Image (tube, rainbow, N blue to C red):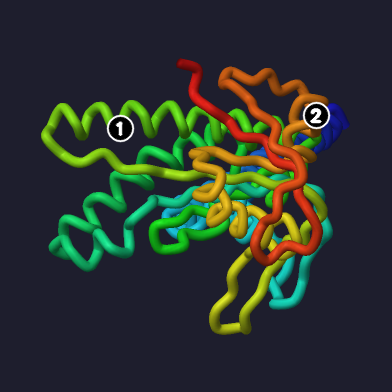
Amino acid sequence: SKITSDYVLYTMSHDILLGAEFDKIISILVVTFLLALVIVRARRLLINSVAQATAAEDLSRFFSPEIADKITHSEGWIEPGTGQTRTAAILHSDLQGFTRLSMEKPANEVITLLAEYQSRMVPIIQKNGGTIDKFLGDGILATFGAAVQTDHYSADCLRAMEQMMAETEAWAAERIAGNLAPQTIRFTAASGSILFGAVGDKSRLEYTVIGEPVNLAAKLDKHAKAEKAIALSTLDCYEEALSQGYTPETQMEIRAARDVGGVTGLVDLVVLKPVV
């Protein structure tokens, strides 16, 4: 009958509407669930990112930014004895007469002087792409092209050396104006093949550089006194820097075939002098 047919049509329409409403609800629930997952995942990523950034910032207080980045982004646990061969430049900076001064002056005055010296030299090294390998008492050992490989490591090293010489002169003028004794700082540089890696044991690790250029830069520091030089580089490092785009802003004097204590054979050197 017509009534029966109408009832059937009504029932079918009602079921279809209910089905459509049910599908809509399911769709909403699925979308809500997916959005919740995305939000949770985004929150975790944000927390991890903040934690990693905080860890990197904390590490940067004790390591150079480049080393801190290597540690925080390492895919596995860093093991001692792992390293890579690199070609790099080494810069050695030394505050002259510091040992005697440390015995004559109060401890707080000595530490204040050391902190001021480092605060003036370290930013220049980092600005020129250098990495602080370690503080050696009153000395600073910096590397260029070791922690982060570049093809202009020697050029960066000698640019940094020139700027550090200029900063030393500015610091001396400030100390003289304040009735304080100016400090003499010597700078030496060498380049070549080095080994860059982690040394120590599982309880105490340190990234460092090992190799002939490292030893030579340190030995040149003592030899610089004999040459009466404030800044000294090997001729190889200097010529390499020129080929990498370095343009000297100081006077240069080549001193060939020098007998450097502790080094086998004669070494060709270059003295960097402030422009008068």
Q: Is residue 16 shown above or below 107? A: above
Query: Looking at the picture, how far across and down is residue 74, in whole percent?
Result: 69, 61
Residue drawn at point x = 79 percent, y = 27 percent = 244
Residue drawn at point x = 60 percent, y = 41 percent = 232
Helix, strand or loop at label 2? It is helix
Query: Looking at the picture, how far across and down is residue 47, in whole percent?
Result: 50, 52
Q: Quadrant of the N terminus?
A: top right
Q: Is residue 199 shown above or below 71? A: below
Residue drawn at point x = 21 percent, y = 34 percent = 175
- Whether pointer 1 and pointer 2 mark residues with C-beta atoms closer than 8 Å, the reply is no
* Mark 1–mark 2 distance (CA, rounded to whole Å): 101 Å
Query: Looking at the picture, how far across and down is residue 169, in whole percent?
Result: 36, 29
Nearest the eye: 164 or 73: 164
Nearest the eye: 81 or 216: 216
Amino acid type for the residue under numbered disc 1: Trp
Task: Tell me the residue that label 2 is attached to.
Answer: 6
Q: Nearer the viewer, mark 1 or mark 2?
A: 1
Query: Looking at the picture, how far across and down is residue 190, in whole percent?
Result: 70, 47
Helix, strand or loop at label 1? It is helix
Q: Quadrant of residue 100?
A: bottom left
Q: Which mark is residue 171?
A: 1
215 relative to 212 in the view: left or right = left
Amino acid type for the residue under numbered disc 2: Asp
Residue drawn at point x = 64 percent, y = 45 percent = 189
The crowding category of the residue bearing disc 2, from other C-alpha atoms within 10 Å (few below 14, some 14 to 19, many at least 20), is few
Tell me if I can see residue 119 in this picture: yes
Q: Which mark is residue 34?
A: none
